[in-house]
Amino acid sequence: MHNPTAQSHAGNDAQQRPLPPFQLSVQSSEMAVREALGGFIACLNPLQLDLEEISTVELVLAEALNNIVEHAYPVAMPDQPIRISCVHRRDGLWITISDKGHPMPDGQVPIGMAQDIDVDIMDMPEGGFGWFLIKDLAKDVSYCRKGQENCLDLRLAVAVRRAI
């Protein structure tokens, strides 16, 4: 079992933010994704997010992390590093997810088209919803390859319940 490690970084403007920047590091596996989600949500507790916001954060992170485990790292390369960094600003949570797996096809985030779900259950696609959900729920989604590392940046707009 892999335990995510949370590291808090106090910046010189930390008093302006209700939540200091933090980082989680996990090794790629389905279990590590679950643990990373739990650790990430726990780090957000000071924000007092409502259930809908928490669900959105969990869904977007779960889709992105599961894509890394399933596609970036081949089966022959289990337990590879995934790093999740988060900074809270007035306009939401700015999240960077990085890994050293295979790059995205064509060097960019997939288009993420909505799937036709008005079909017989047997004709329902098994996958293909992830990037559509990520792009629909997150803002400012961007991807780049820096050397041997994938970097996915996104912003999740969450309500600020205390003064920043």
Image (cartoon, rainbow, N blue to C red):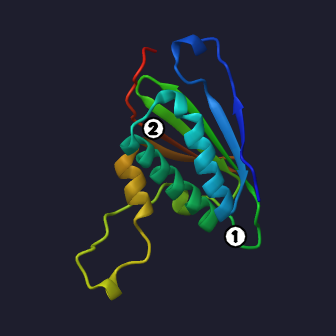
Tell me residue 158's x, y (percent).
40, 33
- Badge 2 marks a residue whose secondary structure is strand
Identify the residue position indicated by label 1 in the image. 74
Q: Nearer the viewer, residue 107 or 81?
A: 81
Residue at the image position 62 percent from the left and 37 percent from the top: 85
- Badge 1 marks a residue whose secondary structure is loop
Q: How many marks?
A: 2
Tell me residue 114's x, y (percent).
31, 64
Give the residue furthest to the bottom: 122
Label 2 crowd bin: few (<14), some (14–19), many (20+), radius 10 Å: many
Residue at the image position 69 percent from the left and 63 percent from the top: 29
Q: As drawn, is 84 to the left or to the right of 91?
A: right
**For the residue marked with disc 2, what is the amino acid?**
Arg
Identify the residue position indicated by label 2 in the image. 155
Q: Is residue 41 above or below residue 131?
A: above
Q: Nearer the viewer, residue 81 or 7?
A: 7
Label 1 crowd bin: few (<14), some (14–19), many (20+), radius 10 Å: few
Q: Earlier in the sequence, mark 2 or mark 1?
A: 1
Residue at the image position 64 percent from the left and 47 percent from the top: 98
**For the residue marked with disc 1, what is the amino acid?**
Pro
Q: Determine the CA span between mark 2 and mark 1.
A: 28 Å
Q: Quadrant of residue 117?
A: bottom left
Q: Quadrant of residue 1?
A: bottom right
Q: Is residue 76 above or below residue 101?
A: below
Q: Nearer the viewer, residue 109 or 86?
A: 86
